[in-house]
Image: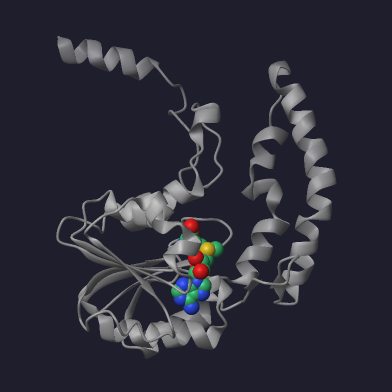
Amino acid sequence: MASQEFRKEFSEAWEGGYYEGDPLDPMAESTYGVYGYSSSLYTVYLACIRPYVGPKTVALEIGPGRGAWSRAILSRHCARLYAVDVAPAEHTHFWDYVGRDERVSYLVAENFELSDIPDVSIDFLFSFGVFCHLRPEMCESYIQSLSRKMKTQANGFLMYADFDKYNHCLDNADSTSLKRFFDHQTRKVWMPVKWTYSAMWHSFRSKVDLERVSKARAHNLTDASGRTSWYHWGVQDACRAILNAGFEVVEPDIRAIGRDPITHFRKP
Ligand SMILES: C[S@@+](CC[C@H](N)C(=O)[O-])C[C@H]1O[C@@H](n2cnc3c(N)ncnc32)[C@H](O)[C@@H]1O
């Protein structure tokens, strides 16, 4: 009897089959509305850190800066974290942000050797927003060192720059960005937000973003002060370097973020 009621209720609902939205579309609209979008950083945490870091994990992060990702790694109760940055902690304010923690060793990099880290000791490698600032030959030096430091079955997640992906993302902002969400709104209540967003898009994007795009086409992005650059490495060359160092590539680009690649690799 109960099963008949169950069938009646659902056989009449959702004529045509229920459709929430396309799970393969990163900007899919859904009944979650404004609650249906996650931060790229949070998505990266869910995809790269949460499933791979646990109480037995010895982790290495290259270029922690203030330590936002370090804190995310530590939140998984890892056994130990080596945080290697070219800048001293007094400059990055790492300890102020992360808090004193016996599990963490903050190491200042003098080169790409990672020599203060014991060989074959690392279970998990993470680096975000760092290799995109290093010239490809520097990235390759780090990869060679990582092959000495990582244990068998250790996982690595590495974000870097691929200007072709970058340009594709910016060139297709109508489908890859929040612009699409606002463009599709027809309800009156959204109109002021839609117009404001559109005005900002046309004035702000044309000045800043388009300049970035044209520079990225030339594979040369330097910030206004001329101090930090973005260097194209590209998924193909990065994966070749990772394979040459004796790793296996689990996924060339996990596609957690629309603009930049993250390669998942593992020590066989
Ligand atoms: C844009 S910040 C990113 C910080 C952090 N990963 C984040 O996403 O919040 C780049 C960081 O990489 C560090 N860095 C630059 N070159 C490096 C190198 N060769 N080795 C290690 N860290 C480096 C910088 O000092 C800086 O802290």
Q: Is residue 261 visible?
A: no
Q: Is residue 91 visible?
A: yes
**Nearer to us in this view, 68 or 151:** 68
Residue that appears at 20% across and 76% down? 121
Q: Tell which residue pokes out farthest to the front in this image.
A: 90
Residue 85 x/y as whole percent: 43, 71
Is 229 on the left-hand or right-hand side of 108?
A: right
Residue that appears at 31% across and 55% down? 73
Say which quarter of the image contains residue 247: bottom left
Residue 222 x/y as whole percent: 71, 71
Is 184 on the left-hand or right-hand side of 132?
A: right
**Nearer to us in this view, 102 or 238:** 102
Say which quarter of the image contains residue 224: bottom right
Q: Quadrant of the N terminus?
A: top left
Residue 46 x/y as whole percent: 36, 49
Image height check: is 9 above or below 21?
A: above
Is 174 on the left-hand or right-hand side of 19?
A: right
**Nearer to us in this view, 88 or 144:** 88
Image height check: is 160 above or below 16?
A: below
Residue that appears at 55% across and 29% down? 34
**How many numbered dots are placed on residues in this image?**
0
Residue 244 x/y as whole percent: 38, 90
Image height check: is 149 above or below 174?
A: below
Image height check: is 74 above or below 251?
A: above
Say which quarter of the image contains residue 49: bottom left
